[in-house]
Amino acid sequence: MKTILYVAASQFSGSTLASFLLNAHPDVTTVGHTMGWHFGPDDDFLCSCGEPLDQCRFYRNIADAYASNELRFDIRNFGTEVRLSVNDRLNRYLTASLPLVQSNRLEQLRDLLVSKFHRNSSRIERQLHTNAVFMTAAMEYCNADIYVDNSHDPYRLRQLGKIKSLALKNIHLVRDPRGVALSCMKHSNWTPELAAKLWLRRQSDILRISGAMGAPNLLVYYEDLCSDVNETLQKIHRFANIDPAPFSGSFDQTEHHILGNDMRLRGGKIRLDERWKTELKPHHIESIESLILKATDNRRNDRLRSIAEHYLGNHGGRNTPPF
């Protein structure tokens, strides 16, 4: 059975790198973020193969599959996002996270109530069908059995689990919260405290939702993916039930059609990004570590506590990182 290999992660956690590395396997294909890429009408946004998206053979094949299923294909919006409202906040409340609540039971009750309205249920069914068409067409084009979706959001993981024609497995990709915080501070102008809180929230949601679904789940550390590439890839390949294949050392040896950051257009070597060690101010590091350790301190035998301790130890671990 063809399989969706979902990558759930906080932002800036190496998911684009993971997409390229996984796409190098002959039994795997991916476009990375599977919702399209919003770019302006005058922007020259290229596929990672180097062609404009509307001229790329891969995406033209996807468009043909859409037409065969009476679906409209938009290169900026694949129609694969589960969306019931144009208002982002309202849509989040209807399909994803509830305000100030982290409860599988309440979210499942909300989903049941939302589905009682025929307009909502038919729209969601169409969006999930669109996902199945897109992923199946991508796999058929590349003669692959695994489609990697690195859309990050664990609530999307829950929605994809409703597609009966495709099996679902989850990779929980984690990066050091201090590294994530630095990227969020640079790119989103967040405070280190906000970045740490949202890292905690995302990790907690991933663990909570993936655990309740019962789908196979594999924890992967970004640092391992960079430092022990082939060993980590072998673990992922076995998890996906495909023959392990080492990375050749060059991204150019594989045809890629991946959307995402500027890495999609450049090659180069895999490099572990630990700039937080020199670019974060000491009081920012202390603030991030203190907030995370305090939030996980009372969670005995808890997976989130284990992840925090992997990076910070029981007392911070700033001077002796475990990697």
Image (cartoon, rainbow, N blue to C red):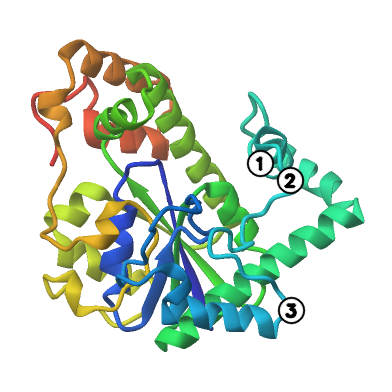
Disc 2 residue type? Gln
Locate residue 9, reporting x and y percent.
Answer: 41, 46
- State the image quarter where residue 214 is shown: bottom right
* Other-residue count near label 2 (Cα within 10 Å), few / some / many at <14 / 14–19 / ≥20: few
Residue nearer the viewer, 220 or 15? 15
Question: How many angstroms separate mark 3 from mark 2 (CA)?
Answer: 31 Å
Question: Element at badge 1?
Answer: helix
Q: Is residue 129 above or below residue 173?
A: below
The label number, if any, that marks residue 104 in the structure image = 1
Number of residue marks: 3
- State the image quarter where residue 95 is shown: top right
Disc 3 residue type? Glu
Question: Considering only order in the chain, which callout, 3 or 1, is on the residue closer to the N terminus?
Answer: 3
Question: Considering only order in the chain, which callout, 2 or 3, is on the residue closer to the N terminus?
Answer: 3
Disc 1 residue type? Asn
Residue nearer the viewer, 280 or 290? 280
* Residue 216 visible within the image: yes
Question: Element at badge 2?
Answer: helix
Locate residue 44, reporting x and y percent.
Answer: 38, 58
Residue at image position (24%, 24%) is: 314
Identify the residue position indicated by label 3 in the image. 70
Identify the residue position indicated by label 2 in the image. 108
| Residue contact between numbered discs 1 and 3, judged by CB atoms under 8 Å | no
* Residue 241 visible within the image: no
